[in-house]
Amino acid sequence: MATAFLFLSFFVMLFLGLPIAICLGASALGYIVFFANTPPLIITQQIISSVDKFTLMAVPFFVMAGVLMEFGGISRRIVAFAKSIVGHFTGGLALAVVVSSVFFAAMTGSGVAATAAVGGIMIPSMVKSGYDQDFACSLQATAGIFGPLIPPSIVMVLYAIGANQSVSDMLLAGIGPGLLQALLVALVAVLICKKRGFRGEGHFSAKRAWAEFKDSFWAILAPFIILGGIYSGVFTPTEAAGVACFYSLLIGLFIYREITFSSMFAVLAKAMQSAAGIMFIVGTSGAFAWVLTRERIPGRAVQMFLGMTGSPAVFLILAVAVLLIAGCFIDSVPIVTIFTPIFVPVAIKFGISPVHFGAIMVSSTCVGLITPPMGLNLFMAASIGNRPTHSVIEEARWFIAITIIGLLMVTFIPPIATFIPTVLK
């Protein structure tokens, strides 16, 4: 009865349109009030203890770095450089969307941020060059899913904390799946462009490419500083987030000079608002997870899955199906924080590497960013392109199909996720 109340109240509030953090916290509080002989103050304590972790400092810093890059001219220069390299091919602007999104993902770790930063430049540019508006929006929404996969990934950090895994290993585990998805999306985009006659833009010019490279050098250098510092041992992933934030601020203020001291506070206010929303979800997810543990949900889940099947492959299919369905309604952050304590013990029982399973979980939630009815990337891209969401969803069907194929490859070919962490360990 208590468990049914917990999940029923959560989904009722979710479908009523309440913020996900409120749904998590209120359902946990309702459980304490009606079914537990425990002071309600425990919810506040769990929220505070869930966010009171040094590793989690990476989250607000990476969010802040992403906003600083967006307003500091970094994203615009990366897009210009990508266009100079691949813009002349068939579907060149579509390829530029993919390449730019990969670069931006390697600096911010956020799917929605990548969609907003790159899409604000590329969607109008594609439409101006004769590309279909809905195709441009759907492509940009799909390219945004690289953010939570390619390091530094906010969602991977949250999974690592929840599953008690090395943050560095989990960040490395996202490289293979992220690049695989980028390759598959680029392939489908080029095939669609070739079929519809969306040609390249001009001819390749080494002079132009060199000029754009020089102009974007400090922007391109950012992911190498962030990731190189982490994997060379110069600083931890948490410290890397601070470095990324400081570097983005210096570039925006003193090199590109697109952030002024007067505008900086407005930029930082936007970053803090986004970061606060994520941390609030993390805190209430911790309270929700405490209730799940009190009700022995993880242990019961282990027994349920073991009773249903003895096959790791069947378990993975069931887990992916659940995560994909959840992704239709919930963002990546709450999905990972809710399901990690439930699924990881089951995966371990089946002998599945927690690092591999983390890549599967995050890949599944990334696909959820473009699946209706609640795909956040679709809404963001449709808003940028000023298009109705349903028409963008219709155009996104081939991209959804290819990303699900990519997800299945990650699920059943473990080295895609585990090879790089194993080699660099």
Image: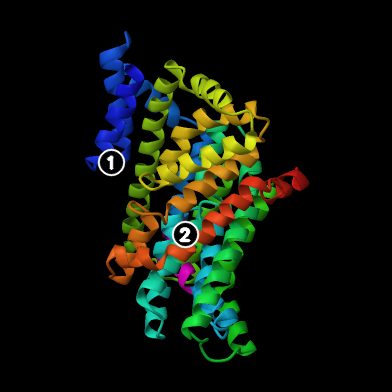
Q: In the rendered view, would you say 122 is above or below 171?
A: below
Image location (x, y in percent) of residue 27: 29, 27
Tell which residue pokes out farthest to the left in this image: 16
Mark 1 or mark 2: name the one nearer the start of the chain.
1
Image location (x, y in percent) of residue 13: 25, 35
Question: From mark 1 to mark 2, how far is it between C-alphas?
Answer: 26 Å
The secondary element bearing badge 2 is classed as helix
Q: Which residue corresponds to mark 2?
A: 400
Q: Quadrant of the C terminus?
A: top right
Q: In the rendered view, would you say 185 is above or below 45?
A: below
Q: In the rendered view, would you say 52 is above or below 398?
A: above
Q: Nearer the viewer, residue 71 or 414?
A: 414
Image point 47% across, 72% down: which residue? 256
Q: Nearer the viewer, residue 359 or 311?
A: 311
Which label is found at residue 31? Answer: none
Q: Is residue 165 left or right of residue 296?
A: right
Asked which quadrant contains residue 15, the reply is top left
Q: Is residue 124 left or right of residue 148?
A: left
Dot 1 alpha-carbon crowd within 10 angstroms: few under 14, some 14 to 19, many 20 or more: few
